Image (tube, rainbow, N blue to C red):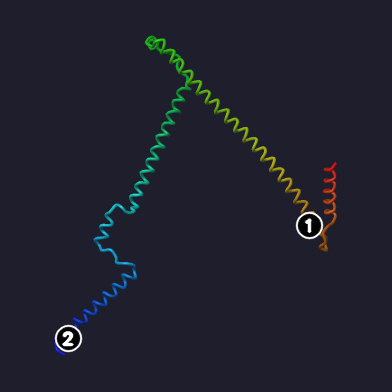
Amino acid sequence: MTKKDNKRNDKHDEKKELMIAKKNKKRNVSRLGGSGRSLNVSANAKSNNNQYNPALIKKQRELYKNAKNVNKYKKMLKRQNLQNEEELMLQPKPQNVDLSENLNETEGDKDKNERRKPRKKDSAFSLEELYKKKHEEKEKERMEREAIFKEKKEQREKAEARRKTLREQMFKKTRKGQPVMKYRIEHLLETIQGSVGNKS
């Protein structure tokens, strides 16, 4: 063999190996369900915002929670302000009033102020009275429920004790293992007398 023949054989072997590699690659691609993405394609795909992004969703949730908390805080502040105003209205006002203020006010202003103030006080007192009444009613209802519950519980316990003693008597046996008939007959007698008593 000459050198040319060796070179040809080497080239032929290389071509054969390349063909086999291509064939194997093709087989693997079809087995795995298509060709994979190249680096460029995958890098571009990650840069697009069109797809699912968990970090963005997390941020949106945090923003939503924060907004919710801010709203709750504002509502709480409003409630506290209302309570403070009610407390101020309930506090007695000092009797020493400047005459200079009274001189500056016209009669119409005085009438308006006098009308407003008692209404607010009355409304606060009436609210307090309503609250007390409702609270008392709820207490009464709760006490009644508790009394009924206790009564039912006592009745249940008595019935259970009766059943337990009756069962013990019914299951009593003699030394030889025979049932004691005395208690059974007494029970039958009681039930017959009870049924006769109900009829008459």
Q: Is residue 144 above or below residue 99?
A: below
Mark 2 surroundings within 10 Å by alpha-carbon count, few (fewer than 14), some (14 through 19), many (20 or more) = few
| Residue type, label 2 | Asn
Q: Residue at x 37, y 43 (%)?
A: 64
Q: Residue at x 45, y 16 (%)?
A: 94
Of the two numbered discs 1 and 2 on the same chain, state the one appearing first in sequence: 2
- Of residue 147 and residue 68, the one placed in the foreground of this image is 68
Q: Which residue is labeled 1 in the image?
A: 171
Q: Position of residue 111 (x, y in %)?
A: 44, 13
Q: Position of residue 52 (x, y in %)?
A: 34, 53
Q: Position of residue 130 (x, y in %)?
A: 55, 27
- Of residue 178 and residue 53, the one placed in the foreground of this image is 53
Write down the quadrant of residue 98 in the picture: top left
Cα separation between marks 1 and 2: 109 Å
Q: Is residue 113 above or below residue 166?
A: above
Is 94 on the left or on the right of 28, as rendered?
A: right
Q: Which residue is labeled 2 in the image?
A: 6
Mark 1 surroundings within 10 Å by alpha-carbon count, few (fewer than 14), some (14 through 19), many (20 or more) = few
Dot 2 falls on a residue whose secondary structure is: helix
Dot 1 falls on a residue whose secondary structure is: loop
Write down the quadrant of residue 36 in the picture: bottom left
| Residue type, label 1 | Phe
| The N terminus: image quadrant | bottom left
